[in-house]
Image (spheres, helix red, strand yellow):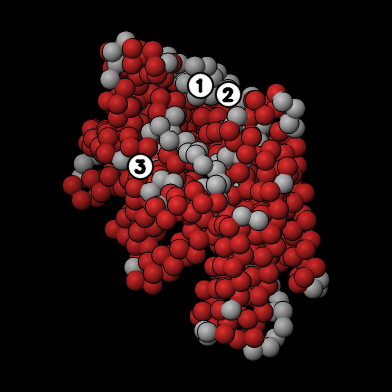
């Protein structure tokens, strides 16, 4: 275990102590923080490890949300519904990944962006099943007090974050992670030496989709109402990229820090400049890309850290 | 009769789609940047036409002449001051940067114009003509004619002018163009400016036909994606072919599956094309 892995686990453990300190607002913020960290870690598998610019986070988030919502309306308990959503997103993403990840660069970016549009329109038009543009109401889980409900969903999302983080750590030390690194550096060479690039990429895409799908499911049960333009919002695809760029592409600790930092900034902007919040977000993105293109990890402290742990000495 | 009506509608709409996509295709082809701000440029152009007509009584035909140079300057400056700094970065960075720019412009438009749908209503209305029982609104016909004219102008510019040849050279082989003494930085800026100018003009034409709202920008962007992939990057004729194919598929899809499924159909077609024929219908390297 490297030092940054330990730091990541400690960071996640610290988040779990949040309910001791704050009320309902802190819980809400903590739940979103965990959700964003799940997004960023998941995106990092395909965007950071394999180097494919995926814009499909929103697609699987929405799909998971709707899958869970529909199942819960049929009377299936939350845990089972989220589990089924997770498996469904995993399977679908592996199949789609095997096809879509043959595309590279711009073409892959556009195809993954279009995936969001396709899923949104499908959900929009399947009115009988999903309620279409009217949205979908999801039954309450416990019916107990507001605070205990909030605590429950916080720990559910936190648990998902823990599972995601452990999976990502496992991937990064496994043969799969090594193979994805090879694919990022030179895919042609990687397949020349006998690496089954298609299989690796499909698994990576599946893993990057399934936890996002589960997060979507928890989100749907948490907010009790979803509609296509909310859960298939393209911003959900872009946010994890900004988080990863903020924290440092490819490093799990970096992207989680990026997710928390991003949430802090978003909350600050949202609270103070509600009318121009997306414009401020845009300015933030541009400043980040122009002045800190390799993320916080590239700052001085991070460089020393990486020198000590000896991981990934150089790559852009 | 329905078949002919669908066909004519597709031709009319297809030329407009081509006009939406051509600037996007130029920027993608030459700068290798997916320009997500394109949709907002189109909407801004539409607001320009609407504002000019509403407040100053300037007809959209003259608005075209205001839109082209002002959007060119806007695009030129954006590329020179911002995009140029990250132009060599991987696709993720350039794409996210244009997304950030799009957020700013779109938010600014929502702030100033509000999210209400507006419509440029010409007085007196132009009505419609019917040729062999096929009904075509005149404003649509004029917009299509202008779109074709704009597309043809770009073709001429790329084909005949010195700058145009330089743009094509950069697209074909950047390094060779540098060796031949082409100033790539300024060509990039000019190409981006041209893309913006085309988007602005397309917006002016869209204002004649469609309602205007900042929220429509992503729909225009989506059309540009699909047209570029269907027709293939790199040629004016490809954009036309892609536009007409998209309009045909949407038209036929609307008749048989219902208009709700037309968008889904077009994006499914996009993904299928990306996988089966990523170079598009008429795709090849080089911009005429």
**Can residue B46 be seen here?**
no
Q: Which chain carries label 1?
A: B
| Secondary structure type for disc 3 | helix
Q: Between B16 and A223, which is closer to the camera in this rendering?
A: A223
How packed is label 3: few (under 14 Cα within 10 Å), some, or many (20 or more)? many
Q: Between A277 and A204, which is closer to the camera in this rendering?
A: A204
Which quadrant of the figure has residue B1? top right
Q: Which of marks 2 and 1 is in front?
A: 2
Residue B214 location in percent, x, y? 39, 52
Determine the residue positioned at 44% across, 41% down.
B93
Residue B280 location in percent, x, y? 58, 23
Q: Do the residues labelled 1 and 3 touch (CB within 8 Å)?
A: no
Which label number is shown at residue B238? 1
What residue is shown with label 3? B41
Determine the residue positioned at 34% across, 53% down.
A283
Mark 1 / mark 3, whichever is N-terminal: 3
Which label number is shown at residue A22? none
Residue B16 location in percent, x, y? 44, 32
Q: Judge left or right: residue B105 versus residue A41.
A: left
Q: Mark 3 lies on which chain?
A: B
Marks 1, 3 in one chain: yes
Q: Are marks 2 and 1 in contact (CB under 8 Å)?
A: yes
Marks 2, 1 in one chain: yes
Quarter of the image that includes the C terminus of chain B: top left
Determine the residue positioned at 66% across, 65% down.
A162
Mark 2 / mark 3, whichever is N-terminal: 3
How packed is label 2: few (under 14 Cα within 10 Å), some, or many (20 or more)? many
Which label number is shown at residue B280? 2
How packed is label 1: few (under 14 Cα within 10 Å), some, or many (20 or more)? many
């Amino acid at each position: 275990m490297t030092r940054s892995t330990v730091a990541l686990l400690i960071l996640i453990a610290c988040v779990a102590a949040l309910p001791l300190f704050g009320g309902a607002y802190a819980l809400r913020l903590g739940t979103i923080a965990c959700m964003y960290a799940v997004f960023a870690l998941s995106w990092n598998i395909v965007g950071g490890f394999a180097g494919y610019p995926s814009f499909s986070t929103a697609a699987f988030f929405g799909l998971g949300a709707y899958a869970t919502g529909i199942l819960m309306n049929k009377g299936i308990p939350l845990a089972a519904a989220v589990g089924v959503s997770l498996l469904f997103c995993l399977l679908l993403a592996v199949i789609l990944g095997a096809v879509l990840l043959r595309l590279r660069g711009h073409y892959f970016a556009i195809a993954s962006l279009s995936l969001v549009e396709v899923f949104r329109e499908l959900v929009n038009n399947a009115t009988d099943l999903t309620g279409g543009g009217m949205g979908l109401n999801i039954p309450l889980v416990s019916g107990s007090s507001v605070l205990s409900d909030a605590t429950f969903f916080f720990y559910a999302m936190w648990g998902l974050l823990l599972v995601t983080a452990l999976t990502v750590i496992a991937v990064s030390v496994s043969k799969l992670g090594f193979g994805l690194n090879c694919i990022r550096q030179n895919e042609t060479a990687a397949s020349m030496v006998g690496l089954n690039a298609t299989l690796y990429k499909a698994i990576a895409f599946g893993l990057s989709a399934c936890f996002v799908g589960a997060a979507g499911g928890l989100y749907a049960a948490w907010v009790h109402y979803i509609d296509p333009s909310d859960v298939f919002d393209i911003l959900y695809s872009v946010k994890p990229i900004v988080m990863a760029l903020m924290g440092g592409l490819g490093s799990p600790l970096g992207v989680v820090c990026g997710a928390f930092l991003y949430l802090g900034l978003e909350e600050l902007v949202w609270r103070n400049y509600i009318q121009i919040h997306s414009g401020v977000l845009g300015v933030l993105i541009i400043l980040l890309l122009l002045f800190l293109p390799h993320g916080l990890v590239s700052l001085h402290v991070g460089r020393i850290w990486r020198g000590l742990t000896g991981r990934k000495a150089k790559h852009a | 009769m329905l078949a002919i009506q669908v066909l004519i509608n597709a031709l009319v709409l297809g030329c407009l789609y081509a006009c939406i996509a051509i600037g996007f295709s130029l920027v993608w082809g030459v700068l290798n940047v997916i320009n997500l701000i394109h949709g907002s440029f189109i909407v801004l152009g539409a607001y320009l036409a609407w504002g000019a007509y509403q407040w100053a009584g300037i007809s959209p035909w003259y608005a075209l002449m205001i839109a082209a140079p002002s959007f060119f300057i806007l695009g030129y400056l954006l590329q020179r001051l911002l995009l140029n700094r990250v132009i060599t970065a991987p696709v993720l960075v350039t794409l996210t940067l244009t997304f950030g720019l799009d957020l700013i412009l779109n938010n600014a438009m929502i702030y100033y114009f509000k999210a209400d749908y507006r419509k440029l209503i010409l007085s007196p209305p132009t009505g419609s003509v019917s040729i062999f029982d096929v009904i075509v609104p005149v404003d649509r016909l004029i917009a299509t004619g202008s779109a074709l004219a704009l597309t043809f102008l770009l073709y001429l510019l790329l084909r005949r002018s010195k700058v145009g040849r330089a743009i094509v050279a950069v697209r074909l082989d950047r390094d060779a163009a540098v060796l031949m003494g082409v100033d790539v930085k300024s060509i990039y800026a000019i190409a981006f400016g041209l893309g913006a100018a085309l988007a602005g003009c397309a917006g002016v034409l869209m204002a004649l036909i469609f309602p205007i709202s900042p929220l429509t920008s992503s729909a225009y962007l989506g059309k540009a994606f699909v047209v570029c992939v269907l027709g293939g990057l790199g040629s004016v004729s490809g954009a036309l072919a892609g536009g007409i194919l998209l309009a045909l598929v949407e038209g036929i899809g609307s008749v048989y599956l219902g208009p709700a499924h037309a968008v889904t159909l077009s994006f499914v077609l996009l993904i299928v094309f990306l996988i089966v024929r990523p170079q598009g219908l008429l795709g090849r390297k080089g911009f005429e």
